[in-house]
Amino acid sequence: MSKTYDVAIVGYGPTGMTLASLLGQQGHDVLVLERYPSLYNLPRAACFDDEIMRTFQKLGVTAEVEPGTLVQRRYEWVNARATRWSRFTTTTRPPPAGRRST
Protein backbone atom coordinates (compact mmCIF):
# COMPACT_ATOMS: atom_id res chain seq x y z
CA MET A 1 0.00 0.00 0.00
CA SER A 2 1.38 3.41 -0.94
CA LYS A 3 1.25 6.49 1.30
CA THR A 4 -0.16 9.78 0.05
CA TYR A 5 1.30 13.07 1.27
CA ASP A 6 -0.11 16.57 1.21
CA VAL A 7 3.27 18.15 0.44
CA ALA A 8 6.68 17.02 -0.78
CA ILE A 9 9.70 19.15 0.13
CA VAL A 10 12.98 18.67 -1.70
CA GLY A 11 15.93 19.54 0.54
CA TYR A 12 16.21 19.51 4.34
CA GLY A 13 18.33 22.61 4.78
CA PRO A 14 17.19 25.50 6.98
CA THR A 15 14.30 26.44 4.68
CA GLY A 16 13.10 22.89 4.05
CA MET A 17 13.35 22.04 7.73
CA THR A 18 11.37 25.14 8.73
CA LEU A 19 8.70 24.59 6.10
CA ALA A 20 8.29 20.91 7.02
CA SER A 21 7.91 21.81 10.70
CA LEU A 22 5.38 24.59 10.09
CA LEU A 23 3.29 22.43 7.75
CA GLY A 24 3.44 19.50 10.19
CA GLN A 25 2.19 21.76 12.99
CA GLN A 26 -0.78 22.60 10.77
CA GLY A 27 -1.63 18.90 10.42
CA HIS A 28 -0.27 18.26 6.93
CA ASP A 29 1.40 14.98 5.98
CA VAL A 30 4.82 16.05 4.73
CA LEU A 31 7.39 14.05 2.77
CA VAL A 32 10.95 15.44 2.86
CA LEU A 33 13.50 14.29 0.30
CA GLU A 34 17.18 14.95 1.04
CA ARG A 35 20.17 13.67 -0.92
CA TYR A 36 22.59 13.65 2.01
CA PRO A 37 22.40 10.99 4.77
CA SER A 38 22.85 13.44 7.68
CA LEU A 39 22.42 17.10 8.57
CA TYR A 40 25.05 19.67 7.64
CA ASN A 41 27.03 20.08 10.85
CA LEU A 42 28.06 23.75 10.61
CA PRO A 43 25.95 26.85 11.35
CA ARG A 44 24.37 28.57 8.37
CA ALA A 45 22.55 31.59 9.78
CA ALA A 46 24.92 34.50 10.38
CA CYS A 47 22.07 36.84 11.20
CA PHE A 48 18.29 36.96 11.17
CA ASP A 49 15.59 39.56 11.63
CA ASP A 50 12.40 39.93 13.66
CA GLU A 51 10.35 37.93 11.16
CA ILE A 52 12.65 34.92 11.52
CA MET A 53 12.46 35.20 15.31
CA ARG A 54 8.66 35.13 15.06
CA THR A 55 8.97 31.96 12.97
CA PHE A 56 11.17 30.47 15.71
CA GLN A 57 8.41 31.39 18.19
CA LYS A 58 5.84 29.54 16.05
CA LEU A 59 8.13 26.50 16.00
CA GLY A 60 8.59 26.69 19.78
CA VAL A 61 12.40 26.84 19.61
CA THR A 62 13.17 30.31 20.99
CA ALA A 63 14.51 28.88 24.27
CA GLU A 64 17.12 26.91 22.30
CA VAL A 65 17.94 29.70 19.83
CA GLU A 66 18.01 32.79 22.05
CA PRO A 67 21.12 31.98 24.17
CA GLY A 68 23.23 31.98 21.00
CA THR A 69 21.97 35.33 19.72
CA LEU A 70 23.29 38.83 20.03
CA VAL A 71 21.05 41.85 19.42
CA GLN A 72 22.54 44.17 16.80
CA ARG A 73 22.56 47.69 18.26
CA ARG A 74 24.59 49.63 15.69
CA TYR A 75 23.67 49.84 12.03
CA GLU A 76 25.47 51.36 9.08
CA TRP A 77 24.05 51.41 5.59
CA VAL A 78 26.53 51.84 2.75
CA ASN A 79 26.38 51.71 -1.03
CA ALA A 80 28.56 49.67 -3.40
CA ARG A 81 31.31 52.30 -3.13
CA ALA A 82 31.32 52.02 0.66
CA THR A 83 29.85 55.50 1.02
CA ARG A 84 27.84 55.62 4.24
CA TRP A 85 24.20 56.56 3.74
CA SER A 86 23.02 56.20 7.29
CA ARG A 87 24.26 55.17 10.70
CA PHE A 88 22.40 54.77 13.96
CA THR A 89 22.60 53.05 17.32
CA THR A 90 19.69 51.76 19.36
CA THR A 91 19.62 51.26 23.10
CA THR A 92 16.19 49.64 23.40
CA ARG A 93 15.97 45.96 24.25
CA PRO A 94 13.63 43.67 22.35
CA PRO A 95 10.64 42.25 24.25
CA PRO A 96 10.90 38.81 25.94
CA ALA A 97 11.58 35.92 23.55
CA GLY A 98 13.14 38.43 21.19
CA ARG A 99 10.22 39.76 19.19
CA ARG A 100 6.53 40.48 19.46
CA SER A 101 4.26 38.01 17.71
CA THR A 102 1.78 39.49 15.28
Image (cartoon, rainbow, N blue to C red):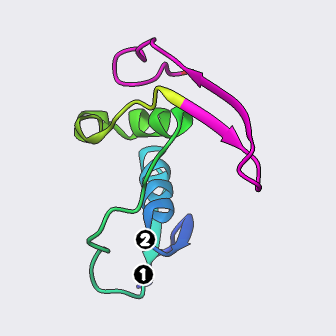
Residue under label 2:
12
Give the residue displayed 43% in from the left and 35% down from the top: 58
Q: What element carries label 1?
A: loop
Three-letter code for the amino acid on which mark 1 is drawn? Glu
Q: Residues within 10 Å of mark 1 (few under 14, many from 20)?
A: some
Are the residues tagged 2 and 1 within 8 Å (C-beta)?
A: yes
Q: Is residue 98 magenta?
A: yes
Give the residue displayed 29% in from the left and 86% down from the top: 37
Tell me the number on the disc at residue 34.
Answer: 1
Give the residue displayed 68% in from the left and 38% down from the top: 77
Give the residue displayed 24% in from the left and 33% down from the top: 63
Q: Main secondary structure of the magenta part?
A: loop
Q: Give the CA distance from mark 2 to mark 1.
A: 6 Å
Depth check: 6 or 79 in front?
Answer: 79
Q: Which of the marked residues, 2 or 1, is nearer the chain's N terminus?
A: 2
Q: Quadrant of the C terminus?
A: top right
Q: Give the range drawn in magenta.
A: 75-101
Counting from the top left corner in percent of width and height, residue 59 is at 38, 41
Q: Does the magenta stretch include residue 36?
A: no
Three-letter code for the amino acid on which mark 2 is drawn? Tyr
